């Protein structure tokens, strides 16, 4: 004998959502970190149901695949034809013949529903021993929704759909939220008696209430404290409205835990993200997915973080990060792009127009400007000069570069992987390094400079440059440095080219 299910959750998600005008089934549209369906399943999760059944139909394969990801324990049940909400629940219960006790039914398109509200509905229902209890709400605009019709004593008489309602019923502003608790046995019995005698020719779940009332069964109405929770989503305008409401709810909750949000209207935090106290979120910032922002970190303005962890007291300014880790006290941006597995250790710096992918930037190391760092390990306190490129891809394979502790890479350097620059080594600006540089050595591949005197006067006569040069030469100015005549090479020595002050001139802090 299978154990009886004392609590079963049924989520209705077979409808097409015609007004979304989308190739994506309505319940799979995303809303700040979860799909509509994901939000509903999260609200139902604390009920600890023995079984959760999701009725799928339109886009069934996509919905099933999504369920495998977000709720592998849920059972999808196919409703091949959408013959109404009553029909959908009937099919769901056929898949769980052992269900007894309470059946909670939730429309798949009410994403703002809170777990506390579902729990309160179920507690009221079970506490009163009702045959059925509906979640109701007083709304400013009930257009399109089913109305709660009460008798003179205030008891539920029936739920009537707007299209089947009398003008007097349409004037009612108390609506059916599409969330219910039922006694399994009496629900099954009533579902077997549903007719399709209504404007849409469908089996309405809502008719169960009228049937139970006629049979003298006790039914209840649980009124939601905040009608916003019961808002459904039928088109993309409503979806955008729900997104704003959820944004405000989420921001308010974070502010109450001690997070500063400078501009809540332009701060979009997924319900799956976390922000620790005394973090400051500046305007136009999105925190998405599993992002975590640590204590006292400053994020924004103009930042998008996806599945990214920002350590305590780090700063991230005008940047985009996906799957990255920013260590405590590290500094990112403005205008940085951190890609998956970019790991910035504590107090490191990734500055302006810098892209980092699958790389460790060591503690206190700096990549301040205009660089690409891919597949690299950069040691503690290393300094990567402006316009350094980690050349990681040979057209077929990716290779790693290792830069040792406190190494110093001059500007405009290519580090051609696989290659290693040892601890404390220097690389002269403008080098293309394809062989390992031993610790403490200077790596340099730069051709010596030569300056060909009088070249502009001869080859660019009549230009503003030629005129400026002529004036400067007349004043006796000289740039100094080695000078050659045309065709004559200067052989500078590597000690001079790479002397620390020369590299220092061109590397930047
Ligand atoms: C339903 C209620 C209405 C309530 C409103 C709240 C009925 C008859 N009416 O109306 O009283 O005010 O919700 O939003 O129940 N679905 C299926 N299979 C079907 C039909 C629908 O799975 O055959 C699913 C839909 O995907 C959706 C949910 O059931 O998630 C509700 O269906 P929908 O067509 O949106 O019902 P409403 O007209 O909004
Ligand atoms: Mg609806």
Image: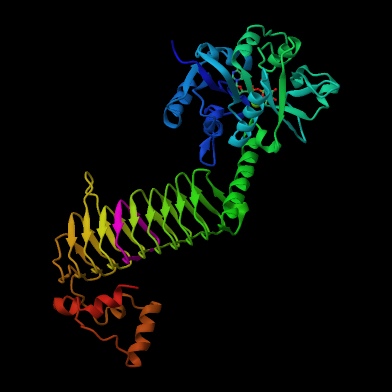
Residue 352 within the magenta-colored segment of the rendering: yes
Residue drawn at (30%, 51%) of the image: 358
Q: Quadrant of residue 243?
A: top right
- Residue 76 image offset from top left, x and y in percent: 48, 20
Residue drawn at (17%, 80%) of the image: 496
- Residue 403 image offset from top left, x and y in percent: 22, 62
In the picture shown, does residue 97 fall above or below 490?
A: above
In the picture shown, does residue 85 fall above or below 238?
A: above
Q: Which quarter of the figure is the N terminus placed in?
A: top left
Residue 225 visible in the snapshot: yes
Q: Quadrant of residue 157?
A: top right
**448 to the left or right of 478:** left
**133 to the left or right of 274:** right
In the picture shown, does residue 266 fall above or below 471?
A: above
Residue drawn at (20%, 55%) of the image: 417
Residue 262 within the magenta-colored segment of the rendering: no
Span highlighted in magenta in the image: 350-368
Name the chief secondary structure element in magenta.
Answer: strand
């Amino acid at each position: 004998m299978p154990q009886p299910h004392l609590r079963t959750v049924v989520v209705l998600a077979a409808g097409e959502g015609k007004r979304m005008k989308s190739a994506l089934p309505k319940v799979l549209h995303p809303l700040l970190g979860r799909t509509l369906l994901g939000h509903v399943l999260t609200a139902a999760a604390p009920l600890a149901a023995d079984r959760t059944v999701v009725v799928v139909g339109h886009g069934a394969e996509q919905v099933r695949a999504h369920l495998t990801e977000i709720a592998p324990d849920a059972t999808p049940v196919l409703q091949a034809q959408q013959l109404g909400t009553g029909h959908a629940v009937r099919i769901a219960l056929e898949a769980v013949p052992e269900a007894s006790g309470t059946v909670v039914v939730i429309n798949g398109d009410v994403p703002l529903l809170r777990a506390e509200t579902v729990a309160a509905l179920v507690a009221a229902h079970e506490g009163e021993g009702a045959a059925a209890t509906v979640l109701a709400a007083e709304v400013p605009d009930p257009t399109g929704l089913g109305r709660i019709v009460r008798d003179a004593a205030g008891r539920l008489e029936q739920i009537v759909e707007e299209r089947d309602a009398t003008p007097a019923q349409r004037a009612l502003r108390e609506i059916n939220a599409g969330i219910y608790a039922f006694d399994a046995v009496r629900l099954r019995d009533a579902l077997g008696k549903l007719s399709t005698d209504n404007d849409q020719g469908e089996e309405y779940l809502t008719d169960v209430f009228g049937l139970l009332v006629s049979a003298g069964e006790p039914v209840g109405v649980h009124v939601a404290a905040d009608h916003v929770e019961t808002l459904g989503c039928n088109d993309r305008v409503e979806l955008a409205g729900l997104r704003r409401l959820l944004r405000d709810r989420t921001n308010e909750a974070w502010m109450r835990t001690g997070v500063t949000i400078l501009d809540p209207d332009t701060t979009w935090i997924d319900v799956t993200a976390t922000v620790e106290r005394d973090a400051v979120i500046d305007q136009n910032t999105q925190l998405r997915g599993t992002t975590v922002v640590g204590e006292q970190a400053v994020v924004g303005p103009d930042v998008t973080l996806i599945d990214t962890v920002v350590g305590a007291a780090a700063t991230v300014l005008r940047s985009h990060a996906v799957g990255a880790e920013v260590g405590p006290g590290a500094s990112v941006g403005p205008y940085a792009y951190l890609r998956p597995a970019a790991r910035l250790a504590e107090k490191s710096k990734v500055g302006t127009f810098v892209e980092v992918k699958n790389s460790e930037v060591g503690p206190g190391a700096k990549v301040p400007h205009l660089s690409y760092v891919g597949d690299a390990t950069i040691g503690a306190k290393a300094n990567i000069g402006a316009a350094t490129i980690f050349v990681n891809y040979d057209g077929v394979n990716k290779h790693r570069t290792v830069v040792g502790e406190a190494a110093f890479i001059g500007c405009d350097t290519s580090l051609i992987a696989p290659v290693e620059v040892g601890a404390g080594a220097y690389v002269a600006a403008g080098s293309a390094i394809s062989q390992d540089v031993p610790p403490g050595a200077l790596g340099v591949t730069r051709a010596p400079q030569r300056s060909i005197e009088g070249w502009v006067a001869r080859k660019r006569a009549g230009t503003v440059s030629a005129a400026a040069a002529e004036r400067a030469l007349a004043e006796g100015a000289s740039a100094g440095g080695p000078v050659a005549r045309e065709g004559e090479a200067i052989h500078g020595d590597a000690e001079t080219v790479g002397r620390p002050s020369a590299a220092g001139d061109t590397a930047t802090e």
